[in-house]
Amino acid sequence: MVYLHGAMCETLRLYPSVPYEHKQSIEPDVLPSGHAIDGNTRILLSIFSMGRMEEIWGSDWMDFKPERWISVGSTDEKKMVVSHVPAYKFAAFMAGPRTCLGRKIAFVQMKAVASCVLRRFKFEVVDDHPVVPDASILMFMKYGLKVRVSNRA
Ligand code: HEM
């Protein structure tokens, strides 16, 4: 389940279900970046881009690596645990007082479905199928995902 958690975070890092978000200032403020903004300023955040920034994720940002979400346990070195990653770094669920309320239940649901389905079936992406995100409020796959499904022996 720890590795599956890492795989899901990694998927959401590269393909966040909510690729863009906006926030609006009530009064003049200074952003953590140091930029001064006026009141009533609309700020558009690209969560999609944040998941692909080298200064946030390192030079291997384009690699799908569930391992980047996993560390060894503090009491037992053989035990793998989910690493703490700040919400302001991994923004797929956003951060702060209006963060996603369903984050934990979303992981429970995704893990329940993935473990039931993957135990019984094997999925192989059809060769040369273009996996292209469709720019929208929610992230869709432009051409869907064509896979070959077979029973696990
Ligand atoms: C992978 C699955 C999900 C993702 C990526 C996701 C992402 C998000 C994001 C980005 C926001 C906006 C937060 C903001 O504007 O600051 C949000 C809000 C919210 N989400 Fe989710 N969400 C997921 C699943 C769920 C589920 C399963 C539930 C409920 C069972 C849920 C309930 C909510 C609620 C109630 C809010 C509004 C929170 C507020 O405005 O105070 N989400 N979510």
Image (cartoon, rainbow, N blue to C red):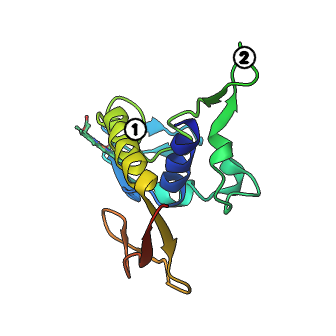
Residue drawn 44% across and 36% down? 29
Toward the viewer: 59 or 41? 59
Please identify the residue farthest to the front as the structure is shown. Answer: 153
Toward the viewer: 80 or 141? 80
Q: Residues within 10 Å of mark 2 (few under 14, many from 20)?
A: few
- 2 vs 1, front mark: 2
Above or below 70: residue 61? below
Residue drawn 38% across and 82% down? 143
Q: Residue 56: horizontal and vertical position, in percent?
A: 66, 48
> Residue 110 vs residue 33: left or right?
left
Residue 76 figure quarter: top right
Give the number of the disc on residue 3.
none
Q: Secondary structure at mark 2?
A: loop
Badge 2 or badge 1: first in the primary sequence = 1
Evaluate if marks 2 and 1 touch, with contact meaning CB atoms under 8 Å apart.
no
Give the number of the disc on residue 28.
1
Q: Secondary structure at mark 1?
A: loop
Toward the viewer: 94 or 108? 108
Cα–Cα span, label 2 and label 1: 48 Å
Residue 101 figure quarter: top left
Residue drawn 47% across and 61% down? 152
Which residue is under mark 2?
A: 76
Q: Is mark 2 within 8 Å of ligand 1?
A: no
Residue drawn 35% across and 52% down? 22
Above or below 26: residue 48? below
Q: Residues within 10 Å of mark 1 (few under 14, many from 20)?
A: few
Report the amino acid beneath label 1: Pro
Q: Is mark 1 within 8 Å of ligand 1?
A: no
> Residue 26 vs residue 90: left or right?
left
Toward the viewer: 97 or 126? 126
Q: How many marks?
A: 2
